[in-house]
Amino acid sequence: MRREERDLSTAEPKSSNESPLPTDADAESRAIRLILADGPLLISSAIASLLTAAGGIDVVAITSGLDDSIRAAAGHKPEVVLYHPPEADNSDAMIVMISALRTASPNSKVVILADSDRPDQAGDALAAGAAGYVLRSEDPAELLKAIDRGSVDSPWISAQVTVAITMAGSGVKSSPLTEREQQIIEAVALGHTNSEIAEQLNLSVRTIESHRARILRKLDLSTRADLVNYAIANGLFDSSKLTKGS
């Protein structure tokens, strides 16, 4: 038997207390606002396409470099910054970027998209305040999970990275300082200026300033004299090297 067709023109209106169907605007308002920070442009563009196609994520900016990323974070205030650190053999640039992003937009969660599962680099990222750590070599579903968890401040680490950290014995180094920070604290204790340290280590003065501020916060210190005492007490350098005044 043919189903009787309903005459919509005479149908009773729905009760006004029923919720309307969701619109495209509603879906967009619920999307996770995200910045792609500092990755190679070709890779970032591909990731942006992937995230957009997955739905529920609004890529509001793709940035290049520290200053560009800071401006975008401060301007857009995204829920998540997906940061792709440069392929370097140390964590310095990554730590500086994470700290700068968190300062520029304190409520944004930084998720790291890394090339390596090195436990020391993962530990440094998490200690610097990253809310997630996922590998570029993993299934895209893992990246989406890290972003989703990060957006609600629920830290998430790749299983592969977790295994590497467990095998290394700890997710955070026994020393609170990275190798580069130890180099800087020795140079500061010896009386070198930020410009001199930057030249010695082939870094920018701004990077050295960020490192010094982070070192003081980590160690709960305030003066160069405090740094000297810490360096001597922890065997970071020979006190006989001290030739400059404080």
Image (cartoon, rainbow, N blue to C red):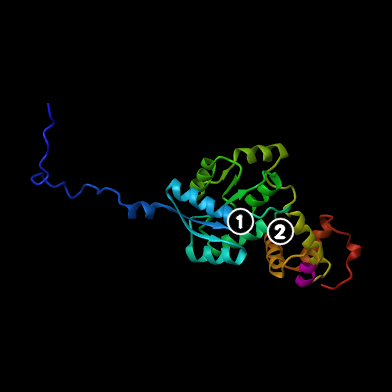
Q: Is residue 82 visible?
A: no
In the rendered image, the quadrant that contains the N terminus is top left
Q: How many marks?
A: 2
User: Relative to 38, is 126 above or below?
Assistant: above
Would you say 13 lies left or right of 22 here? Answer: left
Where is residue 198? Give x, y as percent. Answer: 76, 68
The residue carrying pointer 1 sits among few (fewer than 14), some (14 to 19) or many (20 or more) residues within 10 Å by Cα, namely some
Between 74 and 60, the residue placed more toward the observer is 60
Tell me the magenta residue range. 194-199
Q: Tag on residue 219?
A: 2
Q: Give amino acid for label 2.
A: Leu
Q: Position of residue 233 (x, y in %)?
A: 82, 57
Residue holding disc 1 = 40
The residue under the point 39% across, 52% down is 30
Percent x, y of residue 61: 50, 60
Q: Is residue 92 left or right of residue 146?
A: right
Let me know if residue 122 is in the magenta part.
no
Left or right side of 59 for 160: right
Q: Secondary structure at mark 1?
A: loop
Q: Quadrant of residue 187?
A: bottom right
Quadrant the C terminus occupies: bottom right
Q: Residue furthest left?
A: 10
For the residue pair 36 and 146, the one nearer the viewer reads as 36
